[in-house]
Image (tube, rainbow, N blue to C red):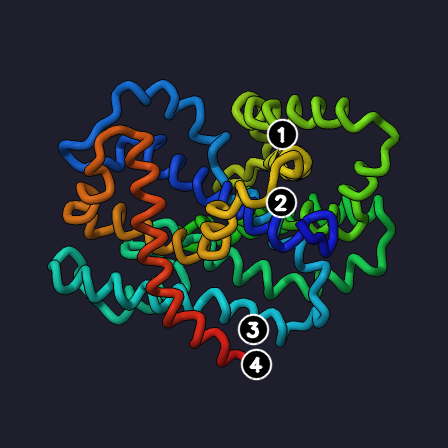
Amino acid sequence: MKKNNFISLTESNILKGVALIFMYIHHMFTFPEWYIDGISYPSLKSLAQIFCNPFNPVSIFCFITGYTYVFSKNKTLKQSFKKILKILIPFWVVLIVFTIIGVITKTYDFSAGSFLLEMFSLKRSVMIFCWYIGFYIIVMISMPLISKISDKMNTTQNILVLLFIPIIIFSALKGIFYRNDIIIVILNNLIRFYPTVMAGYLVSKYKVFEKLESIDIKERYKLILCLFVLISSFLLKYLVPNLSFGEIYSRRHMISLSMNLEIIYTPLFIYSFIKLARLFNAKLYIPLIKIGKLSMLMWFTHCLFFNCSKEIFMPILYAPGNAILVLIWAIILNYAMAFLFNIVTSRLVKLIK
């Protein structure tokens, strides 16, 4: 695998492929309350409770977003809006198609106001899993400023300011906008995942993975340690998901201050996974690479089976019955849809200059 930095483009796609599969497992098997009548996996109920948090893959995408931003040639607001458009255009195309499907099947009551909110993931009747769109917009708008502030600080200051100050700001904003459900959802997502974006940025900026590589330990021992860390990252995400700093009380409400420990678990998982993945021939990862390249669209397309039209489409997704076969079928089905959407969206995205 040809490397640009510690994480090559190929390895980035492999990670996205793995994260996408984790996402499917997370959505398809750890929320039994989402199933329509006739679909159930009672044998997986205990596993669903255990793996609901460890299989949440969003942290991988968040980390990669921060990690790769370091290599952006133009860290400007204009460039950020270009990046935003590159994700919004595919999102809008899928949204329009799925909205039309909802209207035709009479499973979606169209209104201009609701559709406008859904265009920026502020409402999600159709694109039910795409809260990340609004999150990504805020992240990209903030990154040019974050980059400038970061360049003026030393390592310790960067860790304290970039990882902790955003949580305090977002928590304070919750106290101001506590009556607005839409804003509260956005702020909760920012509190949980924004630090992971910053962790990716700092790991890349200070070449943490490269420094881990330079530690003088025999490679076989390092690989054994990586396997241990890989397994531990899942267990710890379940046992110790966050660190609480207490609560702040006001006359009207309470604000809980906590740090999602994904900022530690995610980089450890990614480093360990890449180290272990390099043991095998790159050709073995071709399916994951292909999935990774279309992971964004596959993220969007699987909404169809859980959204307002799920009574029609969920039975198609779960038709194979067996959980493993259902997962494989879901990957094939969504890859096919994403491939077709990509024919259109890739041409539209190329128009952004």
Mark 4 or mark 2: name the one nearer the start of the chain: 2
Label annotation for residue 353:
4
The residue lying toward the viewer, choosing from 62 and 245, is 62
Mark 1 or mark 4, whichever is nearer to me: 4
Alpha carbons under labels 1 and 4: distance apart: 43 Å
Q: Is residue 56 left or right of residue 274?
A: left
Residue 191 lies, in percent from the top left, at 57, 45
The circle on residue 82 is 3
Q: Is residue 84 left or right of residue 266?
A: left
- Residue at image point 26% right, 28% down: 322
Image location (x, y in percent) of residue 302: 33, 50
Q: Earlier in the sequence, mark 1 or mark 2?
A: 2
Q: Which is nearer the N-term, disc 1 or disc 3?
A: 3
The amino acid at mark 2 is Thr
Q: What residue type is labelled 1?
A: Leu
Sequence order check: which comes first, mark 1 or mark 4? Answer: 1
Residue 192, image quadrant:
top right
Disc 1 to disc 4: CB gap under 8 Å: no
Identify the element where label 4 is drawn: loop
As measured in the structure, the alpha-carbon distance from the residue carrying label 1 to the one carrying label 3 is: 35 Å
Q: Look at the picture and state if 144 lies above or below 44.
A: below
Q: Residue at x 26, y 47 (%)?
A: 305
Residue 318, relative to residue 135: is it above or below?
above
In the structure shown, which secondary structural element does the residue marked by tag 2 occupy? helix
Query: Which residue corresponds to mark 1?
Result: 243
Which one is closest to the eye, mark 3 or mark 4?
4
For residue 52, which quarter of the picture? top left
The picture places residue 316, in percent across and down from the top left corner, at 19, 44
Mark whose residue sits in front, 1 or 2: 2
Q: Name the residue under label 2.
A: 196
